Amino acid sequence: MKIYVSTALKAKEITGLLTSYGEGGVSFTFIKKTGLKMEFEVAGIEGAAAIDLVKKLIRGTDYGPALYFSVSEV
């Protein structure tokens, strides 16, 4: 499955956060960035669970609680 993470700030940090994640057989592969949208291929998790995991990971960073971002399925 593919997801979009949209944000104006911290794109490099979010890309690094997701691509380095590897728990429970879940992995994220960066595909491309278009404007504010970053596209990732997700393996090991589907649908709403994948979106919720990405939101949890971003909010768990020091910048996450103050960052405006959205996560959606492609």
Image (spheres, helix red, strand yellow):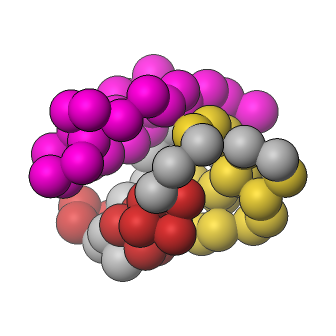
Q: Is residue 70 above or below residue 67?
A: above
Q: How many marks?
A: 0
- In the rendered view, does 33 fall on the left or right side of 13? right
State which quadrant residue 18 falls in.
bottom left
Between residues 6 and 51, which one lies in front from this camera angle?
6
Between residues 21 and 49, which one lies in front from this camera angle?
21
Position of residue 1 measured from the top left corner of the image (x, y, whole percent): 66, 44
Q: Is residue 47 above or below residue 45?
A: above
The residue stretch that appears in magenta: 47-74
Between residues 72 and 37, which one lies in front from this camera angle?
37
Residue 9 within the segment the image draws in magenta: no
State which quadrant residue 65 falls in.
top left
Q: Is residue 34 visible?
A: yes
Q: In the orientation shown, which residue stands out farthest toward the right?
A: 34
Q: Is residue 28 visible?
A: no
For the point 43% across and 37% down, the residue is 50
Position of residue 69 measured from the top left corner of the image (x, y, whole percent): 48, 31
For the point 24% across and 48% down, the residue is 63
Between residues 62 and 31, which one lies in front from this camera angle?
62
Position of residue 19 measured from the top left corner of the image (x, y, whole percent): 46, 72
For the point 46% across and 57% down, the residue is 10
Residue 52 within the segment the image draws in magenta: yes
